[in-house]
Every structure is written in C-alpha cells, then in structure tokens.
Amino acid sequence: MKLWDKFTKLFSEDMAIDLGTANCVVYVQGRGIVMFEPSVVAVNQKTGQILAVGEEAKKMVGRTPSHITAVRPMRHGVISDFEVTEEMFRYFIEKARKRKLLFNMRPRVIVGVPVGVTEVEKKAVIDAGKSAGAREVFLIDEPMASAIGIRLPVCEPQGSFVVDLGGGTTEIAVISLGGIVFGKSLRVAGDKLCEDIMQFVQEEYKLLIGERMAENIKIGIGLAYSSDSAAGKAGSAAAKKEKPVKRDFKMRGRNLVTGLPEEIVISENEIRKAIDRSVRQIVNEIKMAIEETPPELIADIMHNGIYLCGGGSQLRGLDELIAKETRMPVKTVEDPKTTVVRGAGMVLENLDTLREVLIETKELEPPK
C-alpha cells in the first residue's frame, strides 16, 4: 500500500480546496496556495454555456446583457446550483494542475464544508468533485481546518475556540481531541452585512447601490464597535491625542426618487448602525457557544483566547466588541482568508496522522 501511495504521489497533484460562498482558494500538495479567485460563474442563459469563471466572471457582475448572468453557485457555504458548481470545480482543478503527463492521475481533493451540513449537501460536494475530475473527495469541517491552519493543538485534550467569518456563514466551534465539542453554522456573515448596508442606504438616502459598492463600503469604512465614547469619558490627554480620525466614503448609485445618478458621502458611524443588528447576532451566538461549552474547556479558552479567522474577521472593532462581551482575549489571525485551505493542505500533507479530523463519509459512498 505504501508503495502504491508513493507511485500515486508521483503522478497526481492532490489538492485542498476552500469552496467558499465568496471566494475559492486552492492548495496543491508540495506547492502551497496556487489560486485565490471569486466563486462566481458567468453563464449564457440561451445556450447554457459557461463564459467565464472566477475573477473574469466577477468583473461581469451587474454589467451583463439580459441573456448573460453572473451567478454565485455556492450559497451559505453549500451548493445551490449543482451543474454550475461542477463546472467551477473543474475549472479550478484544471487550472491548478501544473503537470501534464501521460500517466497523470486524477487528484485526491480535500474540501472544507460548514459545520452541520446535511448528508445530501455532503453528497452534493463529493459528487461535484468527482464529476469535475477528482479521484477521491474528502470533507473537513471549516472551523477544524482553520484551527489546524493556525496551528492550534486540535488533537490534544485542550479546548480551542475558533470563529470563522466567511461570506455566507459564520462558523463557531470548540475543538478538543481531534473533534468538534460544540459547533454552530450561522447564516449571518459578510454577505448579510452587505445586504444590511444596501438596505440602510436605500431607506436613509433613497439611493440604490449594487453589491460591489456595498462590499467596497464595508471594506473601506466598515465598523463593528467604537471605543471613542469610552475614551472620551476617561478624559485623559493620551486618549484625546490618540483619538482616531473618522472615516467617510463616497458612494455612487441611482436616486430612487429622481431616477438619476447621485453621489453621497456616508460615515463609518452610519455603517456601524447599519450592520449592528447582524454583528450583535454573531456576538450572541458566540456567547451561547460559551454557555454550551464544558467548564474544563472554558478554562483553556480563557487562557488561550478566541481565534477569529475568515475575511469577515477583518471588520474593524469586531475583536474589541467580542472581547468586551465575552470577557475573554480575542485574537485575529494572520492572513485570515486562507486559514481553511492552509489547514486542509496540512491535513493533505499528513493524511496518515490527521485522517481522524476528516468527516466520516463512508456511508455516502454507493454500495459495491
């Protein structure tokens, strides 16, 4: 068996894929991360032809004629359009493969999925992967992959608390001894914050903006928590000297009253109000997870802290808000957008020793 493994390693390029709602990241064994592209596909509705995938397709969002649609086939971390996801899967696998050998074998693929996905959703990912050209498809819980990616001791009898804020879901998990002690997948994440901003702007300014503009506003001046008022009350000279500069953003859209284009300046405090409800929902779920966690593991988490990863963790002030509400140290990891694929890649490189962290999928295989 070991000889066969060595042979297959020579002639196949196994890979780990974070098939996210917003972005797809690909890790190839022995080469590291080779691709980071949006999970967007442009489809010709007349012919059913796939016109573009990834970055090229994202450029088309909101700018296509009626017969061409730029779609995101992943919703809330799971497949919403099987055929389009299969084509996207195939595109990423083919693009990531560097060697074109005569005996080039189909790769084994590890895919990150949200906590608590149904058997049907698991099977959809496996089937899409195999149809796209994978020899074998393994699944791993995204927060488990993130914990491995940031090198937490997941296989030891020690509690690790991970919050992965992606585009479609927020994954909350307490991990110990190679398994998830408590896990929750919350369908409030980056996309929901963009929706909140679009709705707020429409209600307050009667201005219609697109998804890309909302995302640019969120990235540019998004704010979850401001400690200005607390610093102001303290009244110290140092606090006044270090008072941060307020940020504004020029947004462009269509005025719903006049129907004409308009540019309006919006402040970070207005954005904080717009996303406050969704941010509070995430914080409340984190507090509920702490309540459900055994006390021995809570002691570990109080010492080690809560780790934030995923693109949504870069929202300013989020770590401060969670630390204030939970009374625990909160750490935002380096390069948070790639923690899932880095962890899945580490499992791929050490499959013999880390196989136990993968999701059991034997029951999903067809009977022989």
Image (cartoon, helix red, strand yellow):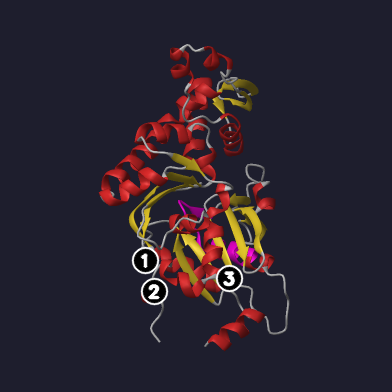
Answer with mark 2 or mark 3, whichever residue precedes in sequence: 3
Question: In the rendering, at what x and y percent does residue 11 appear?
Answer: 66, 81
Residue shown at the point (36%, 62%) measured from the top left: 177
Question: In the rendering, at what x and y percent does residue 223 appear?
Answer: 51, 29
Q: Is residue 225 magenta?
A: no
In terms of depth relative to the viewer, which is nearer, 1 or 92? 1
Question: In the rendering, at what x and y percent does residue 195 appear?
Answer: 49, 36
Please give the residue where the numbered disc 1 appears in the rendered image.
119
SS for tag 3? loop
Please give the residue where the numbered disc 2 appears in the rendered image.
364
Please give the residue where the numbered disc 3 appears in the rendered image.
132
The residue under label 3 is which amino acid type?
Answer: Ala
Tell me if I can see residue 79 in this picture. no
SS for tag 2? helix
The quarter holding residue 84 reads bottom right
| Position above or below: 151 against 365 | above
Q: Tags 2 and 3 in contact by the CB under 8 Å rule?
A: no
Residue shown at the point (53%, 71%) measured from the top left: 350
